[in-house]
Amino acid sequence: MELRHPRYFVAIAEAGSMTVAAGRKLHTSQPSLSRQIRDLEEELGAQLLTRRARGIELTPAGRTFLDHARLVLSQVDAAGEATRRVANPSKPCFTMGFLTGHELTWIPEALRILRVELPNINVMISSQYSPPPFPRETLMQVFFDANEACQSRRSVLS
């Protein structure tokens, strides 16, 4: 079985129609898609869907295959994402929150300090009318992470 077979099958099941899946989701021809599904059914030895005048209906075997196909595709996506993260590690992110109306007094200076002290982090700024409650553990972890990043930066510069 090739990876495209579960992708095609999930697209058809979610669209409820071979024609819709072929044209809108998969950008292929309907006869080609039908052939791929017939090949998949032959390989599995089970009919996965019933073709109707107004779409398709999954058979019990098709419903079972759909659950497993979604799991396989999710694992393939996760494997790709994990590989990309290892190959291209992203910068850590530091999020600053503030109450709307007070940002002009301190954000420019805070950003300047962060750029100087922690050039290898991404800074995300969030404004709200009232801050959400943060658990103490979260605040301590943010403080620890920022402090560790500053210490690492200072040791590199020394």
Image (cartoon, rainbow, N blue to C red):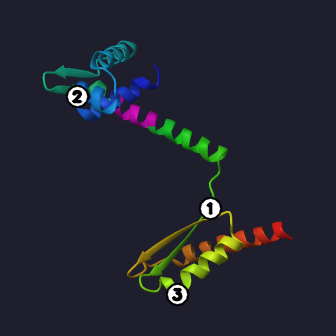
The rendered magenta stretch, by its main secondary structure, is classed as: helix
The numbered mark at residue 17 is 2
Q: Is residue 122 above or below residue 75?
A: below
Residue located farthest toward the right when viewing the structure as drawn: 158
Horizontal placement of 155 versus 74: left or right? right
Residue 146 at least partly seen: yes
C-beta proximity under 8 Å, tags 3 and 1: no
Q: Is residue 58 visible?
A: no
69 relative position to 31: left or right: right
Name the residue located 60 percent from the left edge and 43 percent from the top edge. 84
Would you name the residue on which mark 3 appears? 105
Of badges 3 and 2, the one in the foreground is 3
How far is mark 3 from mark 1, CA to CA? 26 Å
Q: Nearer the viewer, residue 94 or 59?
A: 94
Residue type indicated by callout 3: Thr
- Residue drawn at x 65%, y 74% is 114
Magenta stretch: includes residue 67 = yes
Give neighbour class at mark 2: few <14, some 14-19, many 20+ (Cα, 10 Å). some
Q: Which residues are magenta?
A: 65-73
